Image (cartoon, helix red, strand yellow):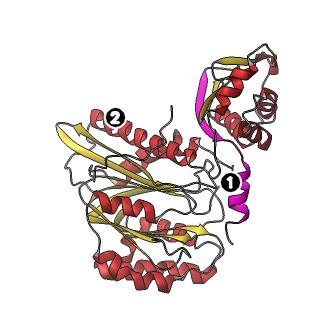
Amino acid sequence: MIDTRPAKTIFIPKGFSFSSGCAGIKPSGRPDIALIACEPQASAAAAFTENQVVAAPITVGRGFLRASRGKVRAVIVNSGNANCATGAHGLNGCKEVCTQSARLLGVPPREIFPSSTGIIGVTFPAEQIVAALPQLISQCEMSEAAARRFADAILTTDTRPKIASSAFQIAGEEVRLLGVAKGSGMIHPRLATMLVYILTDMAATPAELRGLLLDACADTFNCISVDGDTSTNDTVLLLASGRSGVTLTNRAARKNFQTELKNLCRSLAEQIVSDGEGVRHVIRLSVEKAKSRVEAMQVARAICHSPLVKTAWAGADPNWGRILAAVGNSGVRVDPRRINIFIGQQKVCERGQFCEFDRVRAHQDLSGRVCLVRVELGRGSQCVTFYGTDLTDDYVHINAEYST
């Protein structure tokens, strides 16, 4: 069963506070700017989109992380405008927001990390954001309510916030983790259309955080897909304040923290895919008996990105032939005579051919909110679990009218 609900209890890591406000970016008048303040400066590591077209905050954020050697004092986020394909105006506007945030906080601009999400190719309203900064920064507080307001302010087409949190012991001391995310459409590995902020009061260097973050992303954020489109703004940022006093100096501590981090990322990833635009059915796809993880991922993506497969899932149609065809079209050199396909607990395709199964039961399985689909390639021992979704008319309506 996948985790589709935000955390009921939030553990705020020591050293972080939150704020949110309105800069008039969203026509609805809803909150559209948000802030995370780090005290003292936090160690940071980030993963970004692999789309070759990137938004201004990606360019600026990458540069500032290099310049600060992985130190961040504050994160400033706006929603409703992606600040992408906005040329020099958008780039300069992003830098101005960071500069003015830094001035108000009394820190160097390189320690401000920017993010944007929303519509591509719309003039970036830097002046509106700058005007709203004094109030945004003055209202910053370390509380569960403020963290939840931050989570709400970064949303676009999402129907709900995505929050995961945990508190655990390492060497007798409490360590806290908090993850806040947004994402609903343009969800695709490498990363996906999402902003993810993960905070901990663990003490770690930027290099240590980077290794942990990339490992966690590989099995979570890079194993989900809603529509196969890779965003221009994707960011996953991991910040460590060090305020717990616990370090990653021994193997046991590192393993414990790594497990908790991966569990938190998995929860956020599952919340994102379950809130996909127009999604009615989430498919937990297991590709098994592959020669390598890379091969299994290639097959999983081919299945989850096939419009024919996704529309069959929308209708809860156990059309296994579409899944088999997608496997054959994946680019992996498969032997159809070795392929088995399962829907729920039923085998629906054996050795690449039809086998008797209960179609009514298979339809019922696919009609549920979450359904397990397994594909055995018969090539090796590697497997991967990947989360995909159906493709509905609601998705078409949402994206047909998104900018108007």
**In front: 322, or 26?**
26
Residue that label 1 marks: 229
**Residue lying at 41% horizontally and 69% vertically, measured from the top left:** 34
* Residue 107: percent from left, percent from top: 30, 76
Quarter assignment of residue 312: top right
Quarter assignment of residue 400: bottom right
**Could you say whether the residue bearing mark 1 is in a helix, strand or loop?**
loop
**Residue lying at 60% horizontally and 25% vertically, measured from the top left:** 382
Q: Which residues are magenta?
A: 381-402
* Residue with the most extreme left position: 172
Question: Could you classify mark 2 by the number of other residues whose Cα lies within 10 Å: few (under 14), some (14-19), or many (20 or more)?
Answer: few
**Residue lying at 38% horizontally and 77% vertically, measured from the top left:** 109
Residue that label 2 marks: 255
Cα distance between the residues tagged 1 and 2: 33 Å
Left or right of residue 12: residue 377: right
Left or right of residue 118: residue 403: right
